[in-house]
Image (cartoon, rainbow, N blue to C red):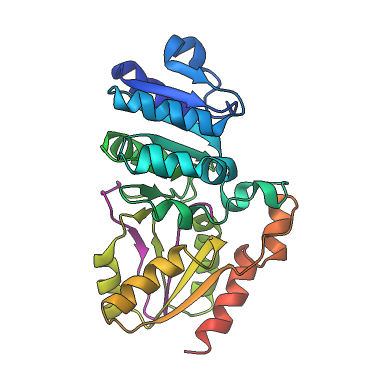
Amino acid sequence: MTYEQLLEKTALENENVVVMTAENRALVRNLPAKLGERFIDTGITEQTMIGAAAGLALRGRIPVVHALSAFLSMRAFEFIRTSVGIAGLPVKLSSFIPGFLSDGNGPTHQAIEDVSIMRGIPTMEVFAPADEQDLVQMLPQIWASSNPSYVRINMRPATYQHEAFQWGKAEWCFRGKDVTLLTYGFMFEETLKARQILQEKGLEVGLVNVRSLKPFDTELVNQLALETSQIITIEDHFEVGGLFSILSEYLIKNGIQLKLHPISLQDKWFKPGRLEEVMAYHEMNAAGLVNQIEKLVSKK
């Protein structure tokens, strides 16, 4: 089932579901004819869309809103924080082309601080599925939550058969004593490839799909402390505020000592270009990740 098919099915089964977009119909092209007045396109007006969604939510609706990640998370941030976050309304934010998936666009369209921004809002839940299969199996629970949510939409085809989603839990795909890789969203695909290469080179490499960033799976961290010698976080996000920060905060707060290294974007936007070019340039493709991981593991 695709994202659009799931949303159509959910909306037809629940008349309170309203689909909204700020003139970004890539994910929902076929829904206007199916939903009629419950499909609302506000035009290129992300703030207006969020304000309207908050009003609909106050009246018992469940708005699922769509916009490009950079504009949804930043242009509309005050409206999300104030109208949705403070009120704790069940507005569901579907964030399109986050991180490296902003293929061919420059810094204005790069959402690489969105996890940091959104997790800072009380009551906001933040998710980053590894691919479309992961996305579709997660969304029913996300949409059923009474809290607002921010989802990094990922329509890439699955290269791994995922376990069923458990609320607030990470997916521990492989265990490894030498190093465990924690990642989310699109970077799961490249990290999975990198892990296979490292395994063939003789390293015991664990891999975790941290698809739920908030709530965060703290039990996972406690178990990692017993099973692995070091952790590397991998993300198409700034180092500050993302998974590395989330994990660091928990380790320090709870007095847990682990060797922790980040692979992320550090204080710079990524080079504009086609996706494969960008990944190679920043050493975030499988080959580049292997190179970076081997250097970090050698320092243990």
In this view, the residue in front, 288 or 234, is: 234
Q: Is residue 19 above or below residue 175?
A: above
105 horizontally vs 225: left or right: right
Read off the magenta span: 165-186
Queried whether the magenta region covers residue 198, the answer comes back as no
Q: Residue 160: give x, y in percent of width and height.
A: 44, 51
Queried whether the magenta region covers residue 185, the answer comes back as yes
Residue at 66% over, 65% down:
268
Q: Residue 298: give x, y in percent of width and height.
A: 53, 88
Picture quadrant of residue 271: bottom right
Q: Residue 295: give x, y in percent of width and height.
A: 58, 83
Picture quadrant of residue 236: bottom right
Instruction: Examine the rendering and report whether any part of residue 252 can be seen.
Output: yes
Q: Residue 73: give x, y in percent of width and height.
A: 52, 45
160 horizontally vs 147: left or right: right
Picture quadrant of residue 68: top right
Residue at 47% over, 69% down:
233
